[in-house]
């Protein structure tokens, strides 16, 4: 089976841009359900990176698992990175699109509200 990991990462970036638009529509009263709640309901696993400061721990990034199995897909909020892996193949896709980055920031902020 030939899986194009770069295409998967690019599709995740496109999905993030759509998520950002849906979040704006929700806040404008155009949608009834919060897209961030729907997004987090589909997350398979969450880990976070923290930094110890003089006044306590600060979360600097969340890593969310978007898919397991074939292939594994992760989003790293602090570095705006999508990682996709399938057996020995691995792609790290850095998100530069401003709309997708804004959506990643919204995901990060939402997770920070929930998990601190």
Image: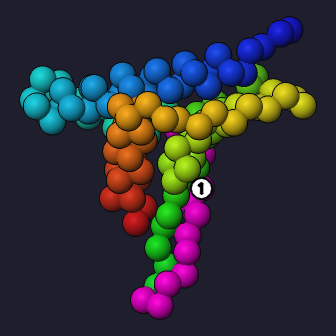
Magenta stretch, main secondary structure class: strand
- Horizontal placement of 88 versus 46: left or right? right
Q: Residue at x 61, y 25 (%)?
A: 9
Q: Can residue 38 be seen in this view?
A: no
In the rendered image, residue 87, in percent from the top left (x then y), is placed at 87, 29
Image label count: 1
Q: Is residue 24 above or below residue 75?
A: above
Which element type, helix, strand or loop, lies under badge 1? strand
Q: In this view, does 74 lie to the left or right of 22?
A: right
Q: Which segment is the magenta one?
A: 43-55
Badge 1, how many Cα within 10 Å: few under 14, some, many 20+? few
> Which quarter of the figure has residue 116?
bottom left
Q: Is residue 32 magenta?
A: no
Q: Is residue 5 left or right of residue 63?
A: right
Instruction: Choose top left, top right, bottom left or bottom right for residue 52.
Output: bottom right
Residue 36, horizontal then vertical, whole percent: 34, 38
Name the residue located 64 percent from the left edge and 16 percent from the top edge.
Answer: 7
Q: In this view, does 30 lie above or below 101?
A: above
Residue 96 place in picture, x, y as percent = 49, 35
Q: 30 or 2, which is in the foreground?
A: 2
- Give the colour scheme of this rendering: rainbow
- Residue 97, how many percent across, how many down? 44, 31
């Amino acid at each position: 089976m030939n899986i194009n990991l770069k295409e998967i990462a690019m599709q995740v970036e496109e999905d993030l841009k759509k998520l950002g638009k849906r979040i704006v529509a929700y806040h404008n009263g155009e949608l009834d359900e919060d897209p961030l709640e729907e997004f987090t309901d589909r997350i398979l696993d969450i880990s976070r990176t923290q930094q110890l400061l003089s006044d306590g721990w600060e979360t600097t990034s969340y890593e969310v698992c978007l898919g397991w199995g074939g292939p594994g897909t992760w989003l790293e909020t602090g570095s705006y990175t999508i990682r996709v892996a399938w057996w020995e193949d691995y792609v790290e896709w850095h998100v530069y699109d401003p709309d997708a980055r804004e959506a990643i920031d919204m995901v990060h902020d939402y997770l920070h509200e929930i998990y601190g």
